Image (cartoon, rainbow, N blue to C red):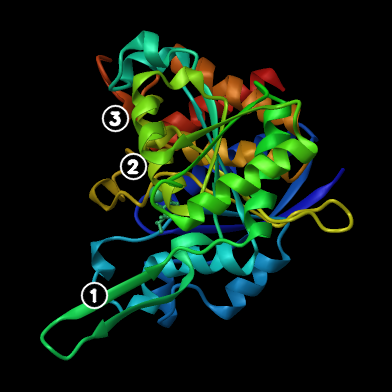
Amino acid sequence: MASYKIFLLPGDGIGPEVTSEVEKVAKVIAGAGLASFEFEKGLVGGSAYDAHGAAISESDMALAQAADAVMLAAVGGPKWDKVPYDARPEAGLLRLRKDLGLFANLRPAVCYPALADASALKREIVEGLDIMIVRELTGGVYFGEPKEIIDLGNGQKRAIDTQVYDTFEIERIAAVAFELARKRGNKVTSSEKHNVMKSGVLWKEVVTGLHAKSYSDVKLEHMLADALGMQLVRWPKQFDVIVTDNLFGDMLSDVASMLTGSLGMLPSASLGAADANGKRKAMYEPVHGSAPDIAGKGVANPIAMIGSFGMALRYSFGLGEAADRIDSAISEVLASGFRTADIKGEAASSISTSAMGDAIVAALQKAL
Ligand code: IPM
Ligand code: MG
């Protein structure tokens, strides 16, 4: 039986609570003899800053590099609002993405039938929704230089961020999107702002070129990012795979999350390039944040985190069937009426983080 090293980074806020539920789910998968997991835990974000003055330590970076997969829950909170910019909680997350070379961020937005009424949109608009946002994760304005605030000396300051993309960065993320589309609805929508940005002009040109060269069997359309934001809330089921840059992907995936009912539902996978053995560095994290307002209360929704573990099974460990079982267990538990507070809707009551984890574990145990 294959054994995998998983490096857990619970982080801040609700992070530790939702991470505990993943450990329960992993036990069930291991118990069924599908794989065994070796867990190691580290610190990232504010908790790492409190412990050693940096958003992630060098030794934890080394453990992340050595792991078969990293699972990160969430970072940040008002407690760290005043820490130096380079040590702010988010810096730990960005360093992991950059140093591990995790350029491809997969953010599926699936609306479980039982939750169609929890969405802010009408049931017919979101029911059966299944889209995949492919966000470029190691380039663009997040990392472009210069990135600074200059004192102009006349009482004015100037802030600069740089949006920059090279051909290879666009090509490799577009290839990920086309490959995924072939296994799904065979359609890619590429999004940028070529009407105002040079990076958008190049993005469109490179995606079009790659499509013609290697993926002409996939349907490709281009949509300006503002229009795509509008279409996502107008008729989201027109999309299959959406490929876009780091910043637009950040925004559009938050929009997509609310189609599914709650930010607490969305998992994600961040993947690096395949090495000679086909192995990729990978980090799995829920799209939601650290939710400091509800941290420590045991009411957070663990589904996005559990779904992220499912993505680890699918994309890092070749256990797609087990991942399907986890998705079905989540669907079944929701259909039976179990709700955490964020997806309570009209339900009479809501259950705790650990009760939701236990319900998913019970449904999974039956299915394995
Ligand atoms: C996300 C988050 C991060 C991002 C923050 C926490 C830096 O919003 O993963 O979507 O902007 O990428
Ligand atoms: Mg975001």
Under circle 2, the secondary element is loop
Query: CA gap, disc 1 to disc 2?
Result: 27 Å
Q: Which mark is residue 341?
A: 3
Question: Along the horizontal axis of the image, is 344 left or right of 143?
Answer: left
Q: The C terminus is located in which quarter?
A: top right
Q: Which mark is residue 201?
A: none
Q: Relative to 149, does residue 36 appear above or below in the rendering?
A: above
Q: Residue at x 27, y 53 (%)?
A: 292
Of tags 1 and 3, the one toward the viewer is 1
Q: Write down the quadrant of residue 121 in the picture.
A: top left
Measured as percent of width and height from the top left, residue 167 is found at 65, 58
Q: Residues within 10 Å of mark 2 (few under 14, many from 20)?
A: some
Q: Which mark is residue 298?
A: 2
Q: Write down the quadrant of residue 114 in the picture.
A: top left
Q: Hey, what amino acid is under mark 1?
A: Lys
Q: The N terminus is located in which quarter?
A: top right
Q: Identify residue for label 1.
A: 82
Label 3 within 8 A of ligand 2 by Cβ:
no
Of tags 2 and 3, the one toward the viewer is 3
Dots 1 and 3: beta carbons under 8 Å?
A: no
Measured as percent of width and height from the top left, residue 157 is found at 20, 80
- Which residue of the protein is positioned furthest toward the top in this rendering? 124
